[in-house]
Amino acid sequence: MPKTHNIVIRRLVELWNPWEALRIEKLSHDQSWLREVEPLTKYRDGLRGPAYHKGRIRFFLERIRAKETLEPICVDNYSTKYPIPVVDDGNHRLIACMLTHKVSVSAYYKGRVDILNYLEGKKNNFPRIEFRQTSAA
């Protein structure tokens, strides 16, 4: 089983926007929108609109309030040229954690260790990214 890491949410969302990833508008912290949707317990493939995403977020909000442990999210660095963290799986869980004012989220992480150290709060600054120019042959 892969190792889990405690990622500082504030640092992750500086670099990754889960609202944009789900293509939905940011939900209010007052959570008045909860009355509009039922919690959706099952992940669904295919077309997923705002009501689906709100239902999934509500489901995870209820799990957090019930003091249940959520499955870790998955964070990766796809590109070596622009190594920005990407949430592969877990945007609904991440938003639920944000709406409950959690400081960190459990995550599986694949990518550069220097970026992980920043995300975990072990380093104060995001790593400097140097770009190499290739010479023309």
Image (tube, grey):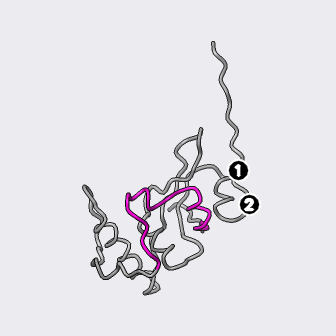
The secondary structure type at the circle numbered 2 is loop
Residue 96 pos. (x, y %): 45, 74
CA–CA distance in space, label 2 to label 1: 9 Å
Q: Which residue is mark 2?
A: 123
Q: How many marks?
A: 2
Q: Magenta residues?
A: 7-29
Q: Which mark is residue 28?
A: none
Q: Nearer the viewer, residue 112 or 95?
A: 95
Residue 77, compared with residue 64, is above or below; it is above
Q: Which mark is residue 127?
A: 1
Tell me which residue sits at (68%, 59%) in the image. Answer: 118
Residue 56 lies in what quarter of the image?
A: bottom left
As drawn, the residue found furthest toward the top would be 137
Left or right placement of residue 12 versus residue 35 in this view: right
Residue 7, compared with residue 136, is above or below; it is below
Left or right placement of residue 31 versus residue 55 in this view: right
The secondary structure type at the circle numbered 1 is loop
Residue 15 pos. (x, y %): 57, 56
Q: Kindly check if marks 2 and 1 are in contact, taking CB atoms under 8 A apart as contact.
A: yes
Q: Nearer the viewer, residue 57 or 43?
A: 57
Query: Badge 2 local density, few (<14 within 10 Å), some, or many (20+)?
Result: few
Q: Amino acid at mark 1?
A: Pro
Residue 126, compared with residue 102, is above or below; it is above
Residue 44 pos. (x, y %): 27, 62
Query: Badge 1 local density, few (<14 within 10 Å), some, or many (20+)?
Result: some
Tell me which residue sits at (34%, 71%) in the image. Answer: 54
